[in-house]
Amino acid sequence: MAAPCRPFSADGPSVPAEPARRAGASRGANGGGGPRRPARGPDPRDAESVAAVTRALDAGAPPPPDALRVAVRYLLAVLAAAVPGRAVEVRVPPVAAVQCVPGPRHTRGTPPNVVETDPVTWIRLATGRLPWADAVGAGAVQASGPRADLAPYLPVDAGSGSGAPSTH
């Protein structure tokens, strides 16, 4: 679709109109060219993907890739809702990352408290199928910084979608 044009005037032919910009909207809060998207909270419908992935993992089968991506994002959103904050960045490349855990807020560069793991390990951690200490000890999780211990917050309560930490 072409950009809207200003009507022809005595000054010359029609030219594409400049898009209206809000003050400060030339670069979004994410440093890119657009506005930052709002954070997505946990959607209880995505819990179905967690169930599909855990069934596959429990059966020793590879999880469906689409369900795995949705389940990772959902469980990260549940963690972020249960433990709000911006002191720790939890990364599950190439799927998603969230900031959580109360404490000093990080704003630029590499955060001082980072947890990084792969999607299957994250599912196992978040659902209680793999203890935090075992994952860190095996090198399946890289955790750096004094606040990067997620053991108190795992497993997450994925069943309700409420974001409340699990009590098991």
Image (cartoon, rainbow, N blue to C red):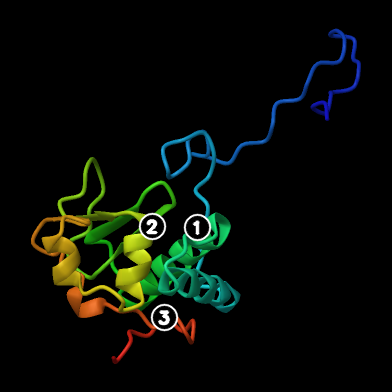
- As shown in the figure, which amino acid type bears the numbered disc 2? Pro
Asked if residue 39 can be seen in this view, the reply is: no
Q: Earlier in the sequence, mark 2 or mark 1?
A: 1
* Label 2 environment density (alpha carbons within 10 Å; few <14, some 14–19, many ≥20): many
Residue 164, disc: none
- Residue pictured at 41% horizontal, 37% vertical: 31
x then y, percent, for residue 20: 67, 35
Identify the residue under disc 1: 69
- The part of the image, by quadrant, that contains residue 146 is bottom left
Disc 2 to disc 1: CB gap under 8 Å? yes
- Foreground mark, 2 or 3, reads 2
Identify the residue under disc 3: 163
The quadrant of the picture occupied by the N terminus is top right
Numbered disc total: 3
* Label 3 environment density (alpha carbons within 10 Å; few <14, some 14–19, many ≥20): many
Task: Give the secondary structure at mark 1.
Answer: helix
The quadrant of the picture occupied by the C terminus is bottom left
- As shown in the figure, which amino acid type bears the numbered disc 1? Arg
Q: Earlier in the sequence, mark 1 or mark 3?
A: 1
Identify the residue under disc 2: 119
CA distance separating discs 1 and 3: 19 Å
